[in-house]
Amino acid sequence: MLIQIYGITTPEDAEVVNALAPDNVGVVLDEGFETWDGVDEATARMIVSELTDVAIVALSLATERDRILRTVETISPSVVHLVRAAEEMTPELLASLRGELDPIRLMLTVPVLNEDSVTQAQNLSEATDYLLLDSAHPQSGQVGATGLVHDWALSRRIVESCTAPSILAGGLGPTNVRNAIDAVRPHGVDSETRTSRDDDRRRKDPEKVRLFIERARSQI
């Protein structure tokens, strides 16, 4: 079970999470979009310097090739995670970008909303290394980092019908990760909001992260 922790905004949190040994750790570089978990270039480089034992995932909200590549240059990740690609980039363009990024792997967010999401995931599956199945806020439309759980039955259908490995996201934390794994059978699980501190969502709660990893890896 691949375990991915997102929302690292300080070098101190990076050091702690690195020691807890998830598989992937996600960093959100400030690209000029409105986000609550983004960091500037200097902070991103300090965070990356602490992530010595995990695969680094660089999230990009951009859909323009040059902006994505600038983010890659800053973070030097193992995986590039594109959040808006499913809506704004064609499978052909994504396949071309994937080839250009190689050996860096590509991850694409699929907002799990309805039956159309299953078709969308199937169309993107051949153009990516991973699909990240996430929730969208019903009012704002924001995808990801909402703390909301979506219909796991739809995600299960995506897992079963797509060739690309699927990572389940959307409101996952220590209290529900085992139920999510049992319901969806994904390749991996992702957590941001529900492994953050209650008093500061930009900071990670080490105990929540530890429990999330422990329970996700449990066979019970």
Image (tube, rainbow, N blue to C red):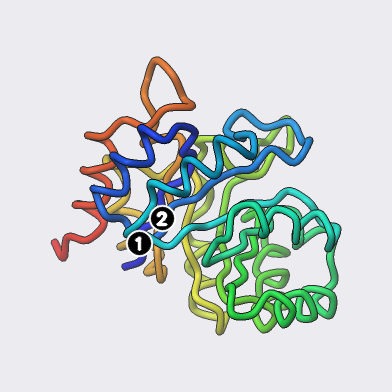
Q: Which amino acid does label 2 sit on?
A: Gln
Q: In this view, does 214 lie to the left or right of 170?
A: left
Residue 170 in the image: state x and y as whole percent. 50, 46
Q: In this view, does 215 lie to the left or right of 28?
A: left
Q: Is residue 88 left or right of residue 153?
A: right
51 or 20, nearer to the observer: 51
Residue 142 in the image: state x and y as whole percent. 69, 38
Q: Is residue 107 left or right of residue 187?
A: right
Q: Quadrant of residue 40?
A: top right
Tell me the residue that label 2 is attached to.
Answer: 4
Identified at 41% across, 55% down, the residue is: 4
Q: What residue type is labelled 1?
A: Asp
Tell me the residue that label 1 is attached to.
Answer: 23
Identified at 84% across, 75% down, the residue is: 93
Q: Where 120 sits versus 72, above or below?
A: below
Residue 78 in the image: state x and y as whole percent. 52, 67
State how far apart marks 1 and 2 are (Cα): 6 Å
Q: Where 164 sits versus 220, above or below?
A: below
Identified at 48% across, 52% down, the residue is: 169
